[in-house]
Every structure is written in C-alpha cells, then in structure tokens.
Image (spheres, helix red, strand yellow):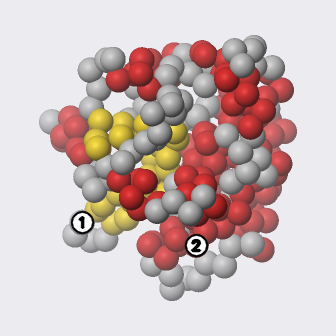
C-alpha cells in the first residue's frame, strides 16, 4: 500500500487531535513516522483485502502488542516528583512507539489509531481509570468504530493493557470490566504536562461533573451526547 493524501490526512487527524498533540512532533519526527507507517503496512502487518473491519482491528491490536514496551523513565519523573526533561516528550508519541519501540500509553493509543485509520477505520481516544486503587494517571485507549449499512458500534482497542494482563496472568476481560471510562475533558487539554508530565490526575478530573461509564459494555454512551448535539 502506498500512502495517499487521504492516508496522510488521517494520520494528521490523529496526531493533531487535541488529546495527543502536534506540539510533541518536529517536522522530521512526523516524516519519519509516516515513513515507518508505510513500511509497516507493506511489510509487517498482513491485512487482506477480504478482511472485515473486526479482523483488521484484531490484527493491528495483535501487532501493537509487540510494541508495548513502556517507557518507565517517563513515569518515574512523576513518581519521584521531578521535572520532566523536554527530551522525554517524544515518548508520548506514535513516533517513539513505532521507531524506538518504547513509549507511554498516549503514544501507544496514537500509533494504534493511526494504523487503523490507514485502513479506513474511524477512531477516537478515550481515558480510563484503571482498577488498581493507586493508579491515578488517566490511561489512554483507542476506540474503533465498526460500521455497516445499518448500524455502528464502538470497540476498545487497548494493546498495552491487554499485553500487560497477559504477562501477569490477569483475566483481561474481567480487568477491562472494572475500568471507568470517560472522554478527555477540557481540563486535560489545557494542562497536559502538569504533575511532572502526566497531566491532571483521575481524582481531580472525577471531582468535576463529567460522564463516566463503569465497564466497557456500554461504551457507546460516551459518544451519544455528542451525536445528539450534532443532530440538533
């Protein structure tokens, strides 16, 4: 597959999404990322023209699970209350996920979204509060839209947590059912790098009046408010 203008526009739509951010890319990083995506699509991910959207999502998720090496150094700045160096910001991006093969969850979600978008699947980024009591950093998750001529539904694509659960022999489906999901709030957009680089914590976000969903069975409810507003 040769990346077309439509592919580039879809890549930009993800990177320029306010929850991620073009500000974390240099022009060279952006070009290197698109080149890496082109190579992956052509050489590493075996997608057939006959694959359904669900099959494409599963293949990309499986591939991304091989790219989920967390950049612990990034998180350590938060844990140790130390100023995050500017050099660490690249690890929030798809660039670091795909080319350096280590990143934090914003980069993994961004890379997952980009690959899905290149196969024509619309995506979003949402947040989750992880089940562990001490996990206060919002977890980034890709949500893919699966649609046909009569219906549309939303599917979580979270290679980072699924891979982590597999490695620890944790039931991922049960773990996922214990998460609290919510859309990224404006407070996050304004303060992405607060708290030594991790942004507003879940406790601060939940202190505000936001919609969150317990478990993943009704994840589409996070998108219903926007759709109703747009129709009106």
Residue farthest toward the left in the current orientation of the protein? 232
Q: Residue at x 58, y 72 (%)?
A: 59
Sequence-first tag of 2 and 1: 2
Q: Is residue 144 visible?
A: no
Residue 59: which disc?
A: 2
Q: Is residue 59 visible?
A: yes
Task: Indicate which label's residue lies in the foreground, 2 or 1.
Answer: 2
Left/right placement of residue 214 relative to residue 32 reads: left
Which quadrant holds the N terminus?
A: bottom right
The picture places residue 6, in percent across and down from the top left corner, at 58, 56
Left/right placement of residue 162 relative to residue 95 reads: left
The picture places residue 47, in percent across and down from the top left corner, at 61, 78
Circle 1 residues within 10 Å: few <14, some 14–19, many ≥20: few
Q: Residue at x 27, y 32 (%)?
A: 211
Q: Residue at x 51, y 67 (%)?
A: 57
Q: Which residue occupies the foreground of this view, 69 or 20?
A: 69
- The answer to whether residue 228 is above or below residue 79 is below
Circle 2 residues within 10 Å: few <14, some 14–19, many ≥20: some
> Count the marks: how many?
2
Residue farthest toward the bottom in the current orientation of the protein? 50
The picture places residue 229, in percent across and down from the top left corner, at 21, 35
Task: Answer with the quarter of the image where residue 37 lies.
Answer: bottom right
- The answer to whether residue 21 is above or below residue 221 is above
Which quadrant holds the C terminus?
A: top left
Residue 19: which disc?
A: none
Residues marked 2 and 1 touching at CB (< 8 Å):
no
Secondary structure at badge 1 equals: loop
Task: Answer with the quarter of the image where residue 183 lies.
Answer: top left
**Marks 2/1: CA–CA distance:** 22 Å
Q: Which residue is mark 1?
A: 151
Secondary structure at badge 2 equals: helix
The picture places residue 201, in percent across and down from the top left corner, at 49, 22
């Amino acid at each position: 597959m040769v990346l077309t203008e439509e592919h580039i526009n879809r890549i930009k739509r993800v990177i320029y999404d306010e929850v991620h951010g073009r500000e974390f890319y240099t022009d060279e990083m952006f070009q290197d990322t698109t080149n890496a995506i082109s190579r992956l699509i052509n050489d590493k991910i075996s997608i057939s023209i006959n694959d359904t959207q669900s099959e494409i999502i599963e293949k990309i998720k499986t591939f991304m699970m091989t790219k989920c090496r967390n950049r612990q150094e990034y998180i350590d700045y938060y844990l140790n209350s130390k100023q995050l160096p500017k050099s660490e910001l690249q690890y929030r991006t798809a660039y670091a996920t795909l080319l350096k093969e280590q990143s934090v969850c914003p980069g993994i979600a961004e890379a997952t979204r980009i690959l899905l978008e290149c196969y024509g699947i619309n995506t979003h980024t949402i947040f989750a509060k992880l089940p562990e009591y001490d996990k206060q950093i919002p977890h980034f998750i890709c949500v893919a839209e699966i649609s046909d001529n009569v219906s549309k539904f939303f599917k979580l694509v979270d290679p980072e947590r699924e891979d982590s659960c597999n490695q620890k022999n944790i039931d991922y489906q049960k773990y996922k059912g214990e998460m609290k999901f919510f859309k990224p709030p404006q407070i996050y957009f304004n303060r992405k790098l607060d708290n030594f680089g991790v942004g507003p914590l879940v406790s601060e976000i939940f202190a505000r009046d936001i919609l969150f969903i317990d478990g993943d069975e009704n994840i589409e409810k996070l998108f219903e408010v926007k759709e109703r507003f747009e129709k009106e």
